[in-house]
Amino acid sequence: MKIVSWNVNGVRAALGRGLESFLTESAADIVCLQEVKARREQVPNEFTGWHVAWNAAERPGYSGTATLSRTAPLSVTHGIGTPELDTEGRVITSEYDAFFLVNVYVPNAGQELERLGYRATAWGPAFRAYVAALAEKKPVVFCGDMNVAVEEIDIARPKQNVGSAGFTPEERQDFRDLLAAGFIDTFRVFEKGGGHYSWWSYRAGARQRNVGWRIDYVCISPALLPRLTEAFIWPHVHGSDHCPVGVVL
């Protein structure tokens, strides 16, 4: 089973940049999209042949997630069950026979770190408790834009970005706590070196120079590790400031 995750930075824009072709060429069984910036009815005739779960933000044109699956899930849940944290469409959970799949778009701390407190002390702990509770029932795969480069190896210029959104001590510790709750960063199972990123600024030719950040992840419960055969980042796929990431189980 191939699972792909991609922050498309606007699904309608991505459809104009070849998203439909990508869905076919990826040969994915499940595709998790983040930052769709649309309601389901705004893209009514797309994604033929997929079972679609959609979680739009209350605020128009903002945030949101969508999960596309070739096989119908057993159940679908929107949000994490905390009303004050579930207004931005950031989580979809799809249950399958062997695991729960959680598609997540973690809040950004903001350029001036105006949402750092919300991100690190409210949203982060609540999400961690949510996936840990799921893992008590069956194994979990969670994937998406986590909006944090957790270690220095995950960012091209760590010294220059200490304290920046996505590389604050609070965000990095929150992600470490999430892994410590019983999850594995799949990409690091196979690749220990640097230079592998999933997001690049649109400024100053950052992508062409590979001055990026690894902020998109697929993480799994340890019980799924024997089934993990591949974890990948696809920087050759354009159409967003992020590139797709994924795994094969």
Image (cartoon, rainbow, N blue to C red):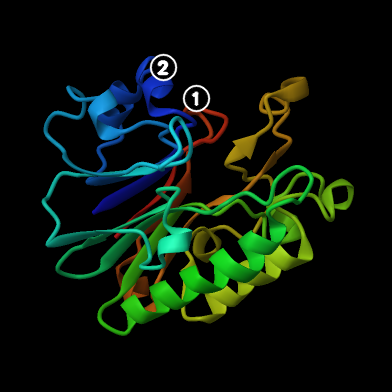
Please give left or right for residue 111 compared with residue 105 in the image. Answer: right
Quadrant containing the N terminus in the rendered view: bottom left
Residue 17: which numbered mark, if any?
2
Please give left or right for residue 71 compared with residue 143 in the image. Answer: left
Q: Classify mark 2: helix, strand or loop.
A: loop
Please give left or right for residue 204 compared with residue 74 in the image. Answer: right
Residue 238: which numbered mark, if any?
1
In this picture, is 85 found above or below 65? below
Image quarter of residue 121: bottom right
Distance CA(mark 1)–CA(mark 2): 8 Å
What x and y, as percent, mark residue 37? Answer: 43, 32
Label 1: how many Cα within 10 Å (few below 14, some 14–19, many 20+): some
What x and y, as percent, mark residue 164? Answer: 80, 50
Quadrant containing the C terminus in the rendered view: bottom left
Q: Classify mark 1: helix, strand or loop.
A: loop
In this picture, is 141 found above or below 20? below
